[in-house]
Amino acid sequence: MSERRVLSSAGERPEPAPSDSGSSRTENFKLVISYEGTEYHGWQRQPGKITIQALIENALQRLTAQTIKLQAAGRTDAGVHAIGQVASFRAVSHLKESDFIRALNALLPPDIRIMEVARVPWDFQARKSALSKIYRYRIKTSAILSPFDYRYVFHYPYPLNKEAMCLAARYFEREDDFTAFSSGYYQYPVRHVYHSVLEETEEELVFTIEANGFLRHMVRTIVGTLLMVGRNRLAPAGIEELFKGKKRTRLSPTAPARGLYLVKVIY
């Protein structure tokens, strides 16, 4: 496997660690977070909207009596779920990690859970220290969708060329300009996808992708492109032409948010 590079802003200098001032020493904390994203307007704090970042920051401020600014490994969109989102923050706290988890979860709604709290080195940053992130997208192909699944999968009960879709998924394993599979303009649109695979289970297609970074809507757009392959609107080899065109087309629609999960962040 190729060497994994961290995407970071050029010219930035690490913030110096504070000197040890005894009992009030500021420390660096890492959170591992799971959430069901249906009821939220995504991760990032937004005026007048309920977001996951805002709820956790508010809970931390109640717990520590300090202003807290969370930095997340990735900003998930409205309706997207997370199994292993990671965020970091700095604060003064004398709580043990186990007590921190219990107290924080008591202040959060049940569809947001803090799975881990850890004190980490001062230079750790949830986004900049990440080597890669893993996302998963679930497509349910059954004729009828269970009411216990509708929040967590994209239901597509129509014929699909699944063999072609599995082949097409491999075309995304590359270091390239992913402009054709994203929303918006990026000055640096090159990303390195280490792993891209579509697997079929019982009445379900599961797409897993790992990369050193993702453009906005990149995973959902890749899934939309795979569905176009499955509908025989695009041949697997046609993905090469989409990369060369470096422009979004009707052959790369955006799949719904509800089937997407941030699975894990690699450090």
Image: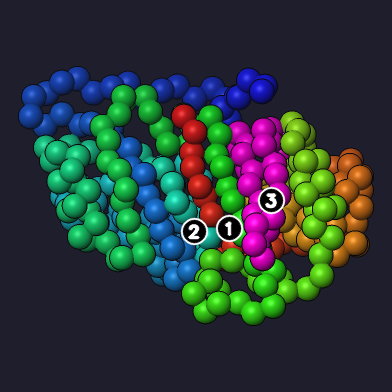
Between marks 2 and 1, how big is the CA–CA gap? 6 Å
Q: Position of residue 263 (x, y in %)?
A: 50, 47
Of 195 and 188, which appears nearest the observer? 195
Find disc 2 in the rendering and name its residue.
81
Q: Position of residue 61 (x, y in %)?
A: 22, 52
Between marks 1 and 3, how big is the CA–CA gap? 15 Å
**In the structure shown, which secondary structural element does the residue marked by tag 1 occupy?**
strand
Between marks 3 and 2, how big is the CA–CA gap? 20 Å
Q: In the figure, is residue 87 to the left or right of 248?
A: left
Find disc 1 in the rendering and name its residue.
260
Q: Position of residue 96 (x, y in %)?
A: 14, 38
Mark 2 vs 1: CB contact within 8 A: yes
Kind of residue sitting beneath label 2: His
Find disc 3 in the rendering and name its residue.
199
Magenta span has 211? yes
Q: Which residue is located at x 27 percent, y 35 percent?
A: 118
Q: In the figure, is residue 114 to the left or right of 158?
A: left
**In the structure shown, which secondary structural element does the residue marked by tag 2 occupy?**
strand
1 or 3: tag closer to the N-terminus:
3
Q: Which residue is located at x 40 percent, y 67 percent?
A: 50
Kind of residue sitting beneath label 3: Glu
Specify the segment rendered in magenta: 189-214
Q: In the figure, is residue 211 to the left or right of 36?
A: right
Kind of residue sitting beneath label 1: Leu
Residue 127 showing in the rendered view = yes
Among all residues in the image, which is located at the extreme front? 202
Of 177 and 199, which appears nearest the observer? 199
Query: Looking at the magenta stretch, what is its main secondary structure?
Result: strand
